[in-house]
Image (cartoon, rainbow, N blue to C red):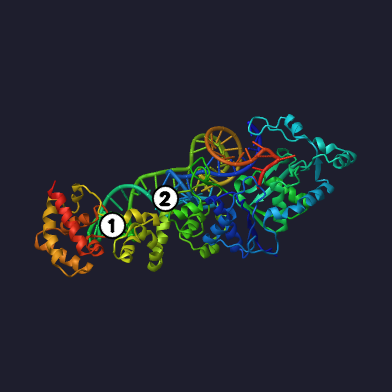
Amino acid sequence: MNKTVRTRFAPSPTGYMHIGNLRTALYEYLIAKSNGGSFILRIEDTDRERFVEGATDVIYKTLEMSGITHDEGPDIGGDYGPYVQSERKNDYIEYAKQLIEKGEAYYCFCTKERLESLGSEINGESVTHYDRHCLGLSAEEIEENLKNGVPFVIRQKIKEGTTTFHDEVYGDITVDNAEMEDQILIKADGYPTYNFANVIDDHLMNITHVVRGSEYLSSTPKYNLLYEAFGWEVPTYVHLPAVMKDQHQKLSKRNGDASFQDLVEKGYLPKAIINYIALLGWSPSVNQEIFTMEELIRAFDVKGLSKSPAIFDIVKLTWMNGEYIKMMPFDEFYDMALPYLKKSVHSDIDLKMLAGFIQTRIGTFNDIAEMVDFVDTLPEYPVELYTHKKMKTDPEIAASSLKLTIPFLKGTDKWTNEELYADLVELAKANGMKNGQILWPIRTALSGKPTSPCGATELCILLGKNETVARLEKGLALIENN
RNA sequence: GGCCCGUUGGUCAAGCGGUCAAGACGUGGCCCUCUCACGGCUAAAACGGGGGUUCGAUUCCCCCACGGGUCACCA
């Protein structure tokens, strides 16, 4: 029989959500959902020093925007609450005492000074483990110390031998227990250490799959020993390789700026971000890159998880974002693009038409501004812009071409794209010119840029007859004054 | 430093003893084309090094190098 799969995302409300964190949450969600299980949100707020006001809201909002919906959590409740760690603190000491009774843990009254005298350096050379000084204390001595209120911690007694655990990604890993020291379970202030609280909470919440970053691989044997000491079933471990900024550095707020929020502000779609990070460290059994959340749930399998770190590539994310933009129904795209368009364009033009031109041309919504900046005011541009090898034009040809097109455009009333295009092509033919020799000067004079989101005739329609004629005459003047 | 983990093109990655070593992004070229983009086609580009095992190693084993992680009364 199979237990219902339960995974949990347990972030600390200490700031913004990194892409790496979000990916962990995504995989936890996918593991649960692809097995018909539940995804639980638990806030680990015991670190008061790093607590940031409003950070929990960022977590809720990010998960919601990402389509990663939790089945239980502080905001919606559930059968295993409370879901905020600071509200669960009462029980931990009792569990630690259980271990003491079982002979799996013991009181330690050593002072900080004594521990330091042991010479246990952290980043230096020698790293010494606790010498188990208090393990040999007699029952009377312990009783006496407790009665006198001597500060104490509770340490786990690590047994001899080796510990082997299985990880779904990294396989079986065996570690010599001598590598571990008698870790502290309960601190002098009565609070549990992070590792201890995690084991208790996960067990109490019936978490079946512990999914977390590979930086926890080294401490997993300690977790295992704790489960064994309690006689509890060891959960399934799934450790995830890191998401890197480059070969050497992990993605972080300090080094990079790739938080979910930042990316959204830069014009990336949550769906594209999720799709991209799903593929950062995981690959499906089918050769497919664009996935909806539903498709991800169906396709997800821990077998596809990678062991090695992946470098976050904003260029590929941008490509994927562009794919999502192109896939959007036009009306939806228009709604989303409108605020950006209104910010850059104040002229009375058909924004809907403009939006139609840019949908296939942007990677993110923030690309819009630069793309339409010529609409309100014609930029200053050099005469050299009239030279285009493939269009077979140069300023001289452009001048004679414009002398033909300006009066024509002034006089025509067939102001639709199809008619204009047909008429201008005919005009070119009648004067022995190539299409490009007629059209390139127009496109250039109207946009003032080497590239534009639409062609010459489309620019005419967009800008309207008056503006079109004015810009063409300006262009002609520019050439003639040089 | 001890221990643990990792190493396929610039990047994401498939591969799970025999392949011309997929695919995608990016890059170059071509086609389409009223510029650019989209779309289509195409090219260049990789198994860290050394030993084994084997008829045969990218794939299995060992060593080395490099990279990462971890060794707290922090989470």
What residue is shown at x 12% (from left), y 53% (from top)? A399
Q: Are marks 2 and 1 on the same chain?
A: yes
**Residue receiving disc 1:** A376
The residue lying furthest to the bottom in this view is A414
Please, what secondary structure does the residue beneath circle 1 have? Answer: loop
Q: Amino acid at mark 2?
A: Val
Q: Nearer the viewer, residue A232 or A195?
A: A195
The spot of residue A234 in percent (x, y) is 71, 53
Q: Nearer the viewer, residue A165 or A354?
A: A354
Q: Is residue A5 at least partly visible in the picture? A: yes
User: Which mark's residue is nearer the viewer, 2 or 1?
Assistant: 1
Query: Marks 2 and 1, how far apart in space?
Result: 30 Å
The quarter of the rendered structure image containing the N terminus of chain A is bottom right
Q: Label 1 marks which chain's residue?
A: A
Mark 1 and mark 2 in contact (Cβ < 8 Å)? no
Q: Label 2 marks which chain's residue?
A: A
The spot of residue A349 in percent (x, y) is 29, 64
**In which image quadrant can residue A9 be found?**
bottom right
A161 lies left or right of A254: right
**In which image quadrant can residue A130 be found?**
top right
**Residue receiving disc 2:** A315
Q: Amino acid at mark 1?
A: Asp
Q: Nearer the viewer, residue A114 or A290?
A: A114
Q: Is residue A388 at least partly visible in the picture? A: no
What residue is shown at x 74% (from left), y 51% (from top)? A227
Sequence order check, earlier mark of 2 and 1? 2
User: What is the crowding at mark 2: few (fewer than 14 residues within 10 Å), some, or many (at least 20)?
Assistant: few
What residue is shown at x 81% (from left), y 42% (from top)? A107
Q: Nearer the viewer, residue B64 or B32?
A: B32
**In which image quadrant can residue A106 be found?**
top right
